[in-house]
Every structure is written in structure tokens, then in C-alpha cells.
Image (spheres, rainbow, N blue to C red):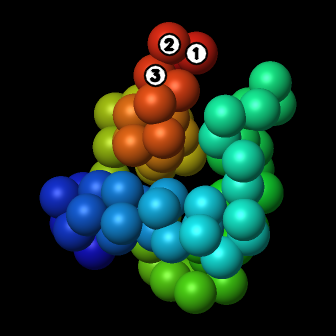
């Protein structure tokens, strides 16, 4: 998979995950990338199969945080 394709999937999936798991982003808790990653790979098993200097997990976590307004954590 191309990195740009994976980015589109991860960014889209982050919002679907919030909806499906009823995450409360306004609470003090932070959304868990690792819980999201498990959910993501159950639906798109190849979503993290791309080449990356930083590594697919790091890129995906960055996109996830960015989409959910958690980029300050990076």
C-alpha cells in the first residue's frame, strides 16, 4: 500500500472509531492509539503495510492524533 493511501484510511478510520466506540473526546481521558490500532487492523488488515522512515505505527499515530485534536501529545 502507498503511504498516501494508508494516511487516507487512518484519518477516515479515526473518526469512524470515535463514532463506533462512542469515545468522549471532551473528557479528561485521551483516546488510545493502541485500541484504535487493533480496531483498525480488524477492518483494514493492510492499513499499516507501507514504507516509512519513522515506521508505519509512528506515522499512523501522528495522523490519528492530528485528526482527533491530540497533536499536542507528539
Is residue 49 visible in the rendered image? The answer is: no
| Mark 1, residue position | 73
Query: Along the horizontal axis of the image, is 50 left or right of 27?
Result: left
Given contact means CB atoms under 8 Å apart, are the residues at marks 1 and 2 in contact? yes
Picture quarter with the N terminus: bottom left
Local SS, label 3 = helix
Figure check: 11 above or below 21: above
Measured in 3D between alpha carbons, the distance from the residue under mark 3 to the one under mark 1, in whole angstroms, is 5 Å
54 or 11: which is nearer to us?
Answer: 11
Determine the residue positioned at 50% across, 83% down.
44
Q: Which of the 4 quarters of the picture holds residue 7?
A: bottom left
Query: Along the horizontal axis of the image, is 73 left or right of 32?
Result: left
Q: Residue 36, position in %: x, y? A: 67, 59
Given contact means CB atoms under 8 Å apart, are the residues at marks 3 and 1 in contact? yes
Local SS, label 1 = helix
Q: Residue 40, position in %: x, y? A: 59, 72
Figure check: 12 above or below 52: below
Q: Residue 72 carries which label?
A: 2
Q: Residue 42, position in %: x, y? A: 67, 84
Measured in 3D between alpha carbons, the distance from the residue under mark 2 to the one under mark 3, in whole angstroms, is 4 Å
Q: Which mark is residue 71?
A: 3
Q: Residue 42 carries which label?
A: none
Q: Residue 14, position in %: x, y? A: 49, 59
- Label 2: few (<14), some or many (≥20) within 10 Å? few
Determine the residue positioned at 72% across, 47% down.
24
Q: Which of the 4 quarters of the picture holds residue 5?
A: bottom left
Is residue 8 visible in the rendered image? The answer is: yes
Local SS, label 2 = helix
Amino acid at each position: 500500500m502507498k503511504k498516501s493511501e494508508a494516511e487516507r484510511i487512518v484519518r477516515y478510520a479515526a473518526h469512524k472509531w470515535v463514532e463506533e466506540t462512542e469515545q468522549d473526546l471532551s473528557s479528561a481521558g485521551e483516546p488510545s492509539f493502541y485500541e484504535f490500532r487493533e480496531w483498525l487492523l480488524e477492518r483494514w488488515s493492510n492499513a499499516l503495510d507501507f514504507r516509512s522512515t519513522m515506521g508505519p505505527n509512528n506515522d499512523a499515530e501522528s495522523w490519528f492524533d492530528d485528526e482527533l485534536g491530540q497533536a499536542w501529545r507528539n
